Amino acid sequence: MKKSFLILFLVFVAWSSGAQIIINRDPEIKKMVEEISRERIEQNVRKLASFYTRHNMSEQNDAVKGIGAAWNWIKSEMEKSIPESDGRLKVELIDYTVGGRGQRITQETKLKNVIATLKGTDPGDDRIILISAHLDSRAALDNDNTSFAPGANDDGSGVAAILELIRIMSARKFSATIVFMTVSGEEHGLFGAKYMAAKAKEEKWNIVAMLNNDMIGNSASSETLLNDNMRVRVFSEGIPAYETEQMTASRKYTSGENDSRSRQLARYIKETGERYVEQMIVTLVYRNDRFGRGGDHTPFCQAGFTAVRVCEYNENYERTHKVPAIINGIQEGDLPEYVDYEYVRKNAGVDLATMANLALAPFEPVNCGIVVTGLTNKTTIKWETPATGVKPAGYYILMRETFQPLWEKKIFVTGNEVTIAYSKDNYFFGIQSVDVNGHESIAVFPGQTRRSPN
């Protein structure tokens, strides 16, 4: 097999090193990020809050109040982008039934998810990139479906961001398909996401990334009184919830417990989001979610898909699941006036940059492996060109010391094999496909191969 040569071009270095960082941006992705409107996001959040409550057991047939009014309005807003998409955008309500005696939803109830699908331009590209937010809201009590529950931040902020992304991205063309998903049932057991994850698994969707945006609009914390709209958290699982015996064996052999597919997606979001959004730090939280709570990415992880949660850095528990009221001189309740709309705009930019870069990137390299035959202080890595899609212009070899959470070096190579003067015992490696415009795939963590390097 012909060996590649190293191009002496380092495009990313450790943040802690103090060295120069080179940033290369796609002008079109940069333009899309700049088109995100803080004013439109605020209008959308205020509209969602105007439905009074979006409780899963609230009114479905009222034109201006309740969860039914909310999902009908979301659908109509999504449909406004169909003309700009040249017919590639499809919007639909997807029904499912939950609830019954002894359950959190106490009676059998039909709920709806609102799904917008922006079809990719390449018929041979079956990749799907999915972004999700939940459209339901609630007050403190599970079955309180009449109290004012505006849900401005939780999760009006996530839904409003998705509506902006649909507006902007529908006018552009991407090789991969992008699915924008707003689901019901989250506040009572992640029901809408569970239904969609089961549907995706049954229909064999090739989901390469799922981003769950849940609460991305609050920048000021309760108790600690922190205020920071320059950080957002990305939660990602380490050991996959869905892990086969073969995956377990590979993880143990390579010590890859911090290199799951979800962790690679989280690192991708950090690099890409910070590349395009000014004054934003993507903080990676190496756990699936917060203590005692869950999100709509979890059913997708459990079904074997690559999924993460995007969430505000500081939470305010005086506004979460509270009926709006002034208690002990403090305004409680998830009201629109307490959403930081500039913060939502920046978080939406992180989403957009990630999805656009990935939807334009080549397929990932396949059969990636580190040669373990023989004793050597160099590392030989082999991979194969993806069989589908446009042939990559080259590949990035990523590397980091084993105790480091983030990739430290990124080296461009061509061909399907490289030997570098770093020991495989001291470093972790990854491999990305890259096209001529610099759009990268998610990194693949290589397994082992005992083939001779010659």
Image: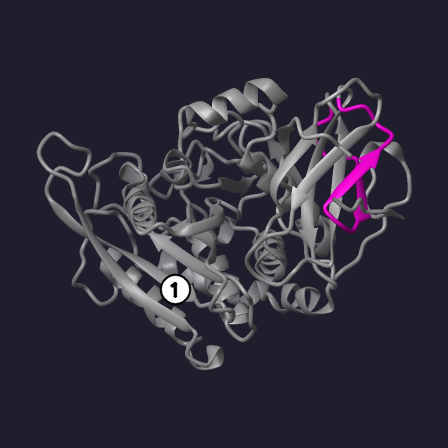
Residue 445 percent coordinates (x, y): 63, 34
Residue 419 in magenta stretch = yes
In the image, what residue occupies the spot 55% across and 41% down? 312
Amino acid of disc 1: Ala
Residue 150 percent coordinates (x, y): 36, 51
Name the residue nearer the viewer: 142 or 120: 120
User: Pointer 1: residues within 10 angstroms few (<14), some, or many (20+)?
Assistant: many
Q: Is residue 40 above or below residue 51?
A: below
The C terminus: image quadrant: top right
Q: Is residue 228 visible?
A: no
Q: Is residue 387 left or right of residue 133?
A: right
Q: Is residue 48 left or right of residue 391?
A: left
Residue 421 found in image quarter: top right
Q: Is residue 67 above or below residue 430?
A: below
Name the residue nearer the viewer: 232 or 151: 232
The N terminus: image quadrant: top right
Residue 229 percent coordinates (x, y): 64, 45
Q: Which residue is mark 1?
A: 116
Q: Which residues are magenta?
A: 404-424
Q: Is residue 264 left or right of residue 83?
A: right
Residue 249 in magenta stretch = no
Q: Is residue 388 visible?
A: yes
Label 1 sits on a secondary structure element that is strand
Name the residue nearer the viewer: 335 or 75: 75
Name the residue nearer the viewer: 178 or 386: 386
Q: Is residue 314 above or below residue 70?
A: above
Count of all numbered marks drawn on residues in the image? 1
Residue 294 percent coordinates (x, y): 40, 33
In the image, what residue occupies the spot 19% across and 47% down? 57
